[in-house]
Image: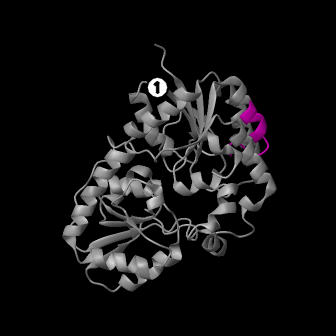
Amino acid sequence: MKSMRVLLLGELSGFHQELRPGLERAGLSVTSAHSRTAFPEYRSDIPLYRPPPSGGGTLTLLRDVASQLLHAREMTGFDVVQLITPKFFNWKLHEPMMRYLKRNNGALVVVNTACTSDYHRRVRELRYSPCAECQAHDLKSDCIYDRPDERRAEYVAWDLADRIVSTHFEYDWALADTPLRDKLANIPLPLDTARHRPTPMPPGPVRIWYGETRFGFKGGRFIRDALTRLANDPTVEIVQSPRLPFAHYLDFLGSVHIMIDQANSYGPGMNALYAMAKGKVVLTGAEAEQGHASPAINILPDGDDIYRHLTSLVGNRRALEERGKAAAEFIERVHSSDAVAQQYAEVYRSIV
């Protein structure tokens, strides 16, 4: 029987990179298309160009548009096209490219794994949200998700999608009160555990790492407060790393005991999964609403809460070992790309 052809369009923190091997082992034929400029470590069969986060001038814009137009024909003839976000293409091409994909392929799946206008609209209703900290520390002007044109662009993708797959409780919940509710599915983040194996806890002081990216959104102020209080503890080493190539980043994770992911989320991000697969203790969002009782330590946007968790771990090497082992087992059971790919394959079969 002919295998299903799937195009994975776009990349975010290695999501599609990790999902692809599971889909291929499940018998699907997979093609990836993303920017090698932004993600040089990840395989891309269709090498799109996307501008850097800082934007760029007119030549950057023209190169972005030209790349998408030149490769448009290569993005046709698939049974399923899966986009990593609802707004992937250059804003000038977004709607025509989305309609082109819909017209020239079997089905569209859009992954809902990051901020959207509906998330921004509703998240303040939850017990806590990243909005105030994000506004205070990350944004130089108004939030893009307050803009009507951003919402319209997202709804081009949402309306054309045959299925919307959310990876976190809060992203799924944000769309549950909209007419899109019947399109929603919820599937955990993927990790190719065949490539990510546990490493031993290192000797010496307890090494704690927190990468200060998206400082406000991830609750960096609260995490920094807790770490500052631990800075003079001789049994603790708070480590920092520069921005590293992906392979070096994974090696670096193997050298720590504890990784702090984020404090404003209800579930873990991809970086938390990489660390857990390495057998590390991870502090992140692990609320009950996310499902799948996790050995990750749920932290709140509260310096006292984070400090209390850290101090209980630092003095208990046995607890570090046991929780790290449980973390790796949890990733294998819940997030392995084989298990996650089977759930995606079921979604694909239901719409093709």
Q: How is the image coloured?
A: one colour
Q: Along the horizontal axis of the image, is 320 left or right of 33?
A: left
User: In terms of depth relative to the viewer, which is nearer, 245 or 73?
Assistant: 73
Q: Is residue 93 magenta?
A: yes
**SS of the residue at dot 1?**
loop
Task: Give the labeled residue for mark 1.
Answer: 28
Between residues 272 and 232, which one lies in front from this camera angle?
Answer: 272
- Residue occupying image coordinates x 43% and y 65%: 284
The answer to whether 147 appears left or right of 302 in the picture is: right
* Residue 176, horizontal then vertical, whole percent: 63, 51
Q: Quadrant of the C terminus?
A: top right
Q: Residue at x 63, y 21 (%)?
A: 77
Question: Is residue 114 visible from the viewing direction of this image?
Answer: no
Q: Which residues are magenta?
A: 87-99
- Asked if one can make out residue 212 in the rendered structure from this viewpoint, the answer is yes
- Give percent across and percent down for residue 318: 19, 68
Q: Is residue 196 above or below residue 45?
A: below
Q: Is residue 175 left or right of residue 266?
A: right
Quadrant housing residue 207 = bottom left
At a point 39% along the width and 50% down the height, the residue shown is 247
Q: What's the residue type where badge 1 is placed?
A: Leu
Q: How many marks?
A: 1
Question: Is 277 within the magenta?
Answer: no
The residue drawn where x is 61% and y is 73% is 133
